[in-house]
Amino acid sequence: MAKTQQTQTTAGRSHAMRWTVAGVTVAVLAADQISKCLVMAHSTAGYYSTAPLSIGLAANHAATMGFGSGSPILITVAALAVAALAAVFALRATSRTAALCLAAVFGGALGNLADRVLRAPGIGTGGVVDWIHVNIAGHGVSLNIADVAIQVCVPIAIIATLIASRRTAANRTAAALATATDLTLAA
């Protein structure tokens, strides 16, 4: 009976967790796309200040740090692969923290992928709309909510996964020792 209740509780948590993962994904995607639309409606392309933090419109046809700037289709395919991996890892994560962070990564990846697929100049060659500009010591970087979600949540998901793996290994070791002790005492 206890085993059945435990299985039902685990399944209920899994079902609830899947809905939570979906909610986080949709929230990040919506925040990213809504913020991009608002900035596009109120900003002029290429205009932002040299202040440490500013808002302005920029189109990014490459990946992070300008990587792949001459291969927009390749970047779009890579973005699709990242989105798929984030979804799979979010659904298989053993840590709630990792699952939620990976859901945010999935939402961010979908936000940037939507820009690449749906924005000008054409399908698969569109530019990602960046609007947050950070300028530190003369080195500027442009990003958006999707980028922030990806860059913040990936390291947290990795750390949470490593911690969960370590706990699982410790629990297995403790269970194996307990079983060995029980067998020794029974003999």
Image: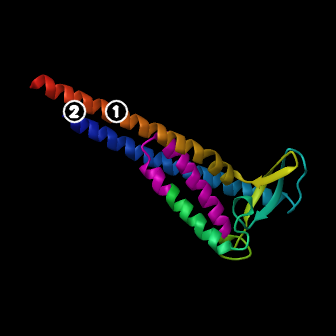
Residue 46 versus residue 160 in the image, above or below: below
The main secondary structure of the magenta stretch is helix
Tell me the quarter of the picture where residue 121 sits: bottom right
* SS at badge 1: helix
The residue type indicated by label 1 comes to Asn
Residue 91 versus residue 7 in the image, above or below: below
Q: Which residue position holds label 2?
A: 2
**Magenta range:** 87-116
55 left or right of 166 in image: right
**Residue nearest the viewer, comparing 170 with 15:** 170
| Mark with earlier residue (1, 2) | 2
Task: Name the residue: 32% across, 38% down.
Answer: 9
**Residue nearest the viewer, comparing 4 with 137:** 137
Label 1 Cα crowd, 10 Å radius (few <14 / some 14-19 / many 20+)? few
- Check if residue 106 falls in the magenta segment: yes
Residue 39 versus residue 160 in the image, above or below: below
**Residue 37 is at least partly visible in this image:** no
Tell me the quarter of the picture where residue 124 sits: bottom right
The quarter of the picture where the C terminus appears is: top left
The quarter of the picture where the N terminus appears is: top left
The residue type indicated by label 2 comes to Ala
The image shows residue 144 at horizontal and vertical percentages of 72, 53
The image shows residue 33 at horizontal and vertical percentages of 68, 57
157 left or right of 147 in image: left
- Contact check, label 1 and label 2, Cβ < 8 Å: no
**Residue 15 is at least partly visible in this image:** yes
- Check if residue 41 falls in the magenta segment: no
71 left or right of 186 in image: right
Task: Name the residue: 85% across, 58% down.
Answer: 43
* SS at badge 2: helix
Q: Which residue position holds label 1?
A: 171
